[in-house]
Every structure is written in C-alpha cells, then in structure tokens.
C-alpha cells in the first residue's frame, strides 16, 4: 500500500502517520506527521530540509491501526540504519 511520508533532511528518518489520531515525529524531532492515511498533515521546523514522498508499506490499514492502538510501533518510523534511535531532545508542554 502506498502512504504519504516525509523524509527529514537532518536525521534521514522517513515518518508517516498510521491512523487519524496518530502523531509521529522523526528521531531528531524536526518533522512531525499526523492525520493518518486520509488526513495526512505534517510540520517541519522552519528552514529545515525535507522531502515529501509516497512509500510502499507492506501492511493494510487494519494492521497499521492495530500497530498504533496496541502501541507496538512497528510502523510509522523508518530509520536509515533500520534501528530506531532514542530521542535526545526535550519536550515542552505549553499551558
């Protein structure tokens, strides 16, 4: 199945959203995707290089939903070396 995705120009991760409520980010945090297969949205930090692309994912929408719902996270983030990197950035909540 083809899905819309964003490749981060910094960490080279490819990120896509699995379901409408799924929000994913690359390992460096400069690219954020959301909205799932039908309502795909993305945000990129200003001045960052990125590439919007369509990629082939070997999973059905049901498998992607189950992956998100069960928190398995086998789909949605593709790292260039195949290993998911630990995030090293801080996350701030604005109230």
Image (cartoon, helix red, strand yellow):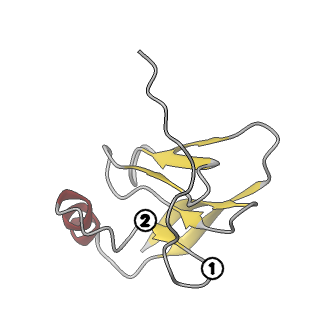
Give the foreground label among 1 and 2: 1
Residue toward you, 93 or 54:
93
Q: How many numbered discs, if any?
A: 2
Near mark 1 (Cα within 10 A), the count class, few <14, some 14-19 or many ≥20, is: few
- Locate residue 75: give its quadrant: bottom left
Residue at screen point 25% across, 69% down = 72
- Residue that badge 2 annotates: 76
Image coords of residue 10 (percent x, y): 74, 60
- Residue that badge 1 annotates: 80
Numbered circle sitting on residue 18: none
Where the C terminus falls, by quadrant? Answer: top left
Image coords of residue 73 (percent x, y): 32, 67
Residue toward you, 64 or 26:
26
Residue at screen point 56% across, 61% down = 27
Dot 1: what SS?
Answer: loop
Residue toward you, 76 or 79:
79
Query: In the rendered view, would you say 14 is above or below 81?
Result: above
User: Position of 57 compared to 42: left or right?
Assistant: left
């Amino acid at each position: 199945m083809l899905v819309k995705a964003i490749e981060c120009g910094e960490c080279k991760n490819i990120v896509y959203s699995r379901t409408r409520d799924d929000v994913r980010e690359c390992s460096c945090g400069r690219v954020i995707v959301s909205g799932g297969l039908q309502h795909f949205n993305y945000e990129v930090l200003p001045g960052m290089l990125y590439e919007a692309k369509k990629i082939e994912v070997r999973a059905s929408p049901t498998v992607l939903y189950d992956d998100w719902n069960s928190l398995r996270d086998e789909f949605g983030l593709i790292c260039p070396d195949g290993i998911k990197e630990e995030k090293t950035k801080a996350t701030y909540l604005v109230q």
